[in-house]
Image (spheres, rainbow, N blue to C red):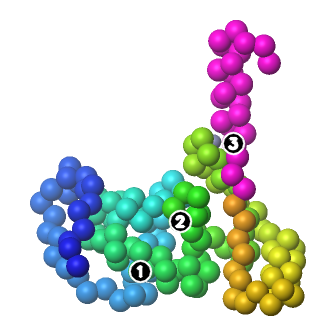
């Protein structure tokens, strides 16, 4: 497997030794959760790896992907498919509203709707379905900004 090349912030801790430490899967899980909770979400695996490197904790994107797979299996993290990025979640069945302009997300618990979907899927004999919903649109802030832009340009509302 080729060594990954990451966009590393070389200004961070220039004298830091990047020796490979042995870390347990559980320790890596907690490291990734800690990194994500400090980053604007959703974050890509490469952004998580770069943030880790900048903080002097060596972590490759491949390691991040493996950790994210575990965290997704544990239900602690979700992948936002349309952004290829990840968020921490406490909802068992979250529904995400995704802004296509600024990539911000809003999360709501979708238990009622999602259970109906799961029920529907199982009635069809559709096995192992893990439905998720991402509603793509434009968030309130971006809607406001574009309305202000139109007004500034003298266009009628
Ligand atoms: Zn937005």
**Alpha carbons under labels 1 and 2: distance apart:** 13 Å
Q: Earlier in the sequence, mark 3 or mark 1?
A: 1
Q: Residues within 10 Å of mark 2 (few under 14, many from 20)?
A: many
Based on the picture, tell me whether residue 79 belongs to the magenta stretch. Answer: no
Residue identified by numbered label 2:
86
**Residue 31 x %, y %:** 41, 74
Residue 60 placement: quadrant: bottom left
Residue 127 coordinates in the image, percent (x, y)? 73, 90
Mark 3 or mark 2: whose residue is earlier in sequence: 2
Decide: is 118 above or below 138: below
Quarter of the picture containing the N terminus is: bottom left
Q: Which residues are magenta?
A: 135-157
Helix, strand or loop at label 3? It is loop
Q: Give residue 92's position: percent from left, percent from top.
A: 71, 78
The residue that disc 1 covers is 66
Q: Which mark is residue 46?
A: none
Q: Is residue 100 above or below residue 42?
A: above
Q: Residue furthest top?
A: 154
Q: Which residue is mark 3?
A: 138
Find out whether the residues at labels 3 and 1 contact each other: C-beta distance under 8 Å: no
């Amino acid at each position: 497997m080729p060594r990954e090349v990451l966009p590393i912030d070389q200004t961070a801790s220039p004298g830091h030794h990047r020796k490979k430490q042995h870390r347990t899967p559980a320790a890596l899980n907690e490291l990734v959760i800690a990194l994500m909770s400090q980053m604007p979400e959703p974050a890509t695996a490469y952004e998580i790896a770069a943030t880790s490197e900048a903080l002097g904790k060596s972590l490759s994107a491949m390691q991040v992907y493996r950790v994210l797979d575990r965290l997704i299996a544990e239900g602690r993290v979700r992948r936002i498919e349309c952004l290829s990025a990840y968020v921490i979640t406490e909802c068992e069945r979250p529904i995400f509203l995704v802004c296509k302009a600024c990539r911000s997300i809003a999360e709501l618990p979708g238990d009622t709707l999602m259970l109906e979907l799961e029920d529907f899927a199982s009635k069809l004999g559709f096995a192992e379905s893990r439905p998720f919903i991402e509603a793509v649109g434009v968030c309130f802030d971006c809607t406001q900004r574009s309305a202000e832009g139109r007004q500034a340009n003298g266009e009628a509302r």
